[in-house]
Image (tube, rainbow, N blue to C red):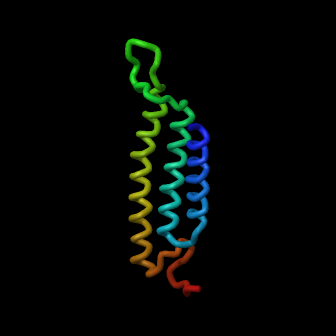
Amino acid sequence: MEWLVATMIGLLIGCGICLLLRSRSFPVVLGLLLLSYGVNLFVFAAGGLHVDQPPLIASGPPYADPLPQALVLTAIVIGFAMTAFVLMLALRALSELGSDRVDERQGDEES
């Protein structure tokens, strides 16, 4: 199971970085989203992969560490807020400039 999680982390982060390097705003938003999912999965896996163990401390020792889960839940909320902000910023830039290129300024001609 560890190799599958490691592969998914690498795939998500690789695709996220590839999309972040595009010049259009929608792929940049998707790249940020994939990158945040990859980082969340990395933080979750850093706490150890436990199967069929509750995250709460019960009467016995077989429990998962609740700290990575709390960190990932917080990161998911922050990621949604950041995605909404970047999406609104991209829509504003599209309405002001008439283009969704991230490196274009007002008055520049399209290439």
Q: Nearer the viewer, residue 58 or 25?
A: 58
Q: Residue at image x 46%, y 18%? A: 62
Q: Position of residue 87 (x, y in %)?
A: 41, 64
From the viewer's perspective, is residue 20 above or below residue 80?
below
Does residue 18 appear left or right of residue 61 in this picture? right
Where in the figure is residue 50, as x and y percent of width and height?
50, 29
Q: As drawn, which residue projects farthest toward the top?
A: 59
Q: How many marks?
A: 0
Where does the image place residue 17, in percent across and percent down from the top left?
60, 58
Quadrant occupied by the N terminus: top right
Quadrant occupied by the C terminus? bottom right
Residue ranking furthest to the front: 1
Q: Position of residue 5 (x, y in %)?
A: 56, 42
* Quadrant of the image occupied by residue 59: top left
Residue 59 versus residue 94: which sits nearer the camera? 59
Residue closest to the eye, 39 or 11: 11
Q: Residue at x 39, y 23 (%)?
A: 56
Name above or below for residue 50 compared with residue 87: above
Which one is nearer the viewer's eye here, 2 or 72? Answer: 2
Residue 17 shown left or right of residue 50 in the figure: right
Q: Is residue 27 above or below residue 97?
A: above
What residue sits 59% from the left and 37% below the top?
A: 2
Q: What residue is rendered at 56% in x and 48% in y?
A: 8
